[in-house]
Amino acid sequence: MKAHRAACSCSGQRESSLEQNSFEADAELIKELEKRSQPISCREGRVLFQQGTVPTGLYILQSGEANLMLESTTGKAVRCLRAGAGCLLGLPAIIGSEPYSLTAMVRRNAEVRFVTRADFEDVMQANPSLYPKLLRVLAAEVRTARQAFSEI
């Protein structure tokens, strides 16, 4: 784990803040997901999910910040993005049933809640009116990621 923690560092790498509201979700969507979420312990540097791993759920960043990193095959961070409060992390992996495409690591003073895949699916099935809100977040994430990766 120590080797990975060092590899997750963004120091010396190009780091950019996400476009305002890039991963930020609508308040109604967050509220409904929070009902089915659990708080998780977040000390600085905690890895929420790792690039290439099977998704288990998504994360609601209630306060603070997280680094999202694209890693090389050797585990070195080649691109870092920063997400703030109100962001949903891991959404593309849950929607697409694909491995996480980034590694997410919390920064100091972050408060995070976790929504399992099953609970996410239950919320969405029970509230079809949330789909357009979900698609807006997903589209913004894809645009932001595409732009960031094109700068590598």
Image (spheres, grey):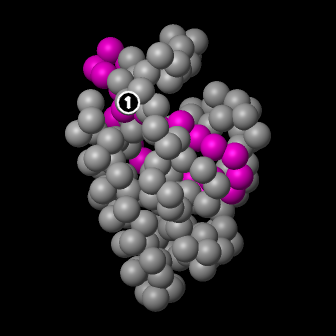
Q: Amino acid at mark 1?
A: Arg
Magenta-span inclusion, residue 73: yes
Whether residue 113 is visible, yes or no, is no
Q: Position of residue 60 (x, y in %)?
A: 60, 57
Give above or below for 90 relative to 148.
below
In screen coordinates, is 106 left or right of 88? right
Q: Position of residue 1 (x, y in %)?
A: 55, 16
Q: Position of residue 72 (x, y in %)?
A: 31, 22
**Res. 22 image quadrant:** bottom left
Q: Position of residue 148 (x, y in %)?
A: 32, 41
Give above or below for 29 relative to 89.
below
The residue at 23%/39% (across/down) is 150
Is 51 or 79 nearer to us in this picture? 79
In screen coordinates, is 69 left or right of 64? left
Task: Identify the residue under disc 1.
Answer: 79
Secondary structure beneath dot 1 equals strand
Q: Quadrant of the C terminus?
A: top left
Whether residue 44 is visible, yes or no, is yes
In screen coordinates, is 143 left or right of 37? left
The residue at 53%/67% (across/down) is 25
For label 1, the crowd category at 10 Å Cα-Cα, with few meaning under 14, some 14 to 19 and many 20 or more, is: many
Is 97 or 68 nearer to us in this picture? 68
Which range is magenta?
52-75
**Res. 99 image quadrant:** top left
The residue at 55%/57% (across/down) is 87
Tally of numbered tags: 1
Is 75 or 12 nearer to us in this picture? 12
